Amino acid sequence: MTVSRDPAVGALAGLRVVDASTLFAGPMAAMHLGDLGASVIKVEHPTRPDPSRTHGAAKDGVNLWWKTLGRNKRTVTANLGSPGGREVFLALAERADVVIENFRPGTLERWGLGYEELSAHNPGLVLARVSGFGQVGPYRTRPGFGTLAEAMSGFAAMTGEPDGPPTLPPFGLADGVASLATAFAIMTALSVRERTGQGQVVDTAIVEPILAMLGPQITRWDQLRTTQPRTGNRSSNNAPRNTYRTSDGHWVAVSTSAQSIAERVVRLVGRPDLVDEPWFARGVDRARHADELDEAVGSWIGLRTRDEVVAAFEAAQAAVAPVYDARDIVEDPQFQALGTLHEIDDPELGPMLMQGPLFRLSENDGVIQFTGRPHGADTDRVLDELGFSPERIAELREEGAV
């Protein structure tokens, strides 16, 4: 679908955000805010742009990931370690509601741009600090990437086949989860500011939000001194729960978290006798009989096409989903009905399809105004808006500050 709504009526219209972060967690948090109408200015080093501009696939030399991650952001260059760059950043922060950064802890302070300095110019500023391990503690200065968070949070330890190695996701899972947590934290801090008039610091350690998403593993260890084992696609809480191959070479996923769904599935696949087994009444007991249940479900599914399986499960009110790749997502009528994918006209590559904002609002819905902009494309215009004269802008550029 093509989206062209007035960003001035977005839910966060009027909110001013400076995104001085790089790679994924911080920039994605800023993207979420921009999708809802916030005015976002992306600050990058003049000669070392955000590395995400070179990550992943490209078309005709134009990076595709940046087109999504950098959407709804005007781009400005500034060397924050230089006097001129500091001057530019202070001018941006003075007029901002939110600054997002992910430098190693202590870096902004070394440049004279810590919260004490920023809040002296703008007491209502919310400074969101995103790092691998937070602003305190023995690991605070370690390089922090989502991969490390996926390892240290327990995610990798519980992911993969029982006899295989710990498994990492093939995308920025921890960064994505941290971006949502950061956006939520920013809005919480802004809510407090509405009551007090004062800004504050948000401290997001990328390792913590994904840890919070992984269920009661900490409580389990505390109370039982056991850890969650790797179970592949199976679950230790219920069965059948797995992916199964169809006769036409596709895959489907089956879930039976509810007892009634489990009963419907085994009846559908011709094994109603299993419902009468003493162990069938509880999910954890069914999980101990996963081999038998997978054989019943898998053999039935393996004789039918994906469309036949999905139709039969839907008729039986049992839970199934096809395993999709990007092509399937684009063609799926449910995503089309939701308006999940937005087509945006990109100046460099033309019409471009990408996933839209995370949710819909009945009023003031999110909108993608434009795709990721070239490095520093808006520097002169933004500096002009901040009151810098053409002569001063030329001086800053000559100094290498912008």
Image (spheres, rainbow, N blue to C red):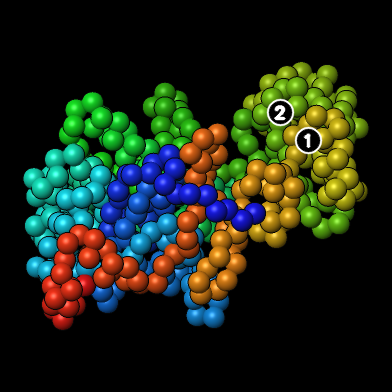
Instruction: Kindly state the secondary structure of the residue where label 2 is placed.
Output: helix
Q: Is residue 228 visible?
A: no
Q: Which image quadrant is residue 293 in?
A: top right
**Residue 240: % across, % down:** 73, 35
Q: Which of the labelled discs sits on residue 286, or is there none?
A: 2
Q: In the rendered image, which quarter contains the N terminus?
A: bottom right
Gap between marks 1 and 2 measured at Cα: 8 Å
Q: Residue at x 23, y 32 (%)?
A: 193
Q: Are marks 1 and 2 in contact (CB under 8 Å)?
A: yes
In the displayed structure image, the side of residue 252 where residue 207 appears, left or right: left
Give the amino acid at mark 1.
Leu
In the displayed structure image, the side of residue 59 where residue 284 appears, left or right: right
Look at the picture and state if 202 lies above or below 67: above
Look at the picture and state if 196 lies above or below 300: above
In the displayed structure image, the side of residue 99 where residue 370 appears, left or right: right
Look at the picture and state if 362 lies above or below 107: above
* Along the line of sight, the residue nearer the viewer: 65 or 122: 122
Give the amino acid at mark 2.
Arg
Name the residue beneath numbered marker 1: 293
* Along the line of sight, the residue nearer the viewer: 213 or 286: 213
* Along the line of sight, the residue nearer the viewer: 367 or 212: 367
